[in-house]
Amino acid sequence: MSYVYVLARSIRKNMNHRIHRNLNSASGAAHALLLALALAVAGCAAQQGGQAASDAAASVVAQTPEQLVAARANARWKALVARDFQAAYGFASPGYRALTSVEGYTSRRGTAVKWIGAQAVKVECSSAERCVATVRIQAQPFLGTRFGDTITTHVEETWVRESDQWWIAERL
C-alpha cells in the first residue's frame, strides 16, 4: 500500500469518528469539514504529484551513444543542406575549431553539387568515445550528369566524444 493511501484511510477513519462523536456540536462539524477539506487536498496533491513524476520519468529516456551520434549527424547535415555553414561548423570538434576558422571551414565545402538531403543510416561505436556514422547523401550536380539529376551516395563520418558531447572529427 502506498503512503498516501494509508494516510487517506487514517484521515477518513479519524473524520468518521469525530463526525459521529461531535455531530451535534458546531465545533465538531467545523472539525469534520476541515478534515474533509484536508483529505480532498491531500488526495489531489498526491494524484498530481504522482502524475508529474510519471510524466517526468517517461520523458527522460536514456539514449544510446548510437542514437546521440545519429541525431547530431542528422542535425549537422540538415545545416549543410540548408548551406548554413556557421551552424554546421558548430558540430566540429573543439580541437578542429581551434585550428580552423569558420571561413576556412566554409571554403572547404565545395560548390560542385547542391545537397538536397542526408540521413544517418547506421552508427557503429567501437568504444564509448568513438563512433562511425554512415550517412546517405542525395545531391544534384550543378553541371548535370549522365546518371540522372540526383546522385545518392554514402559517406562515413567519425564522431568523438569530448566533454560529454559528440563532435565530428573533421580532417585538417
Image (cartoon, helix red, strand yellow):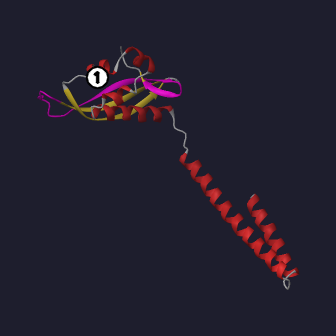
Residue 127 or residue 31, whichever sits in front:
31
Residue at image point 33% right, 28% down: 86
Residue at image point 20% right, 27% down: 113
User: Is 160 rendered above or below residue 18?
Assistant: above
Answer whether residue 1 is visible to the viewer in this image: no
Residue at image point 29% right, 22% down: 106
Residue at image point 11% right, 29% down: 146
Quarter location, residue 149: top left
The location of residue 2, given as percent across then percent down, is: 74, 58
- Residue 1 is left or right of residue 60, and the answer is right
The location of residue 62, given as percent across then percent down, is: 55, 39
| Farthest residue, direction front | 26
- Residue 147 is left or right of residue 15, and the answer is left
Quarter location, residue 124: top left
User: Is 139 rendered above or below residue 129?
Assistant: below
User: Is 49 rendered above or below residue 66?
Assistant: below
Image quarter where the N terminus lies is: bottom right
Image quarter where the C terminus lies is: top left
Q: Is residue 156 magenta?
A: yes
| Farthest residue, direction right | 21
The location of residue 88, given as percent across then percent down, is: 35, 29
Query: Secondary structure under badge 1?
Result: helix
Q: Which residues are magenta?
A: 141-167
- Residue 63 is left or right of residue 6, and the answer is left
- Residue 28 is left or right of residue 108, and the answer is right
Q: Which residue is mark 1?
A: 106
| Farthest residue, direction bottom | 24
Answer whether residue 107 is visible to the viewer in this image: yes
Q: Residues within 10 Å of mark 1 (few under 14, many from 20)?
A: some
Q: Amino acid at mark 1?
A: Thr
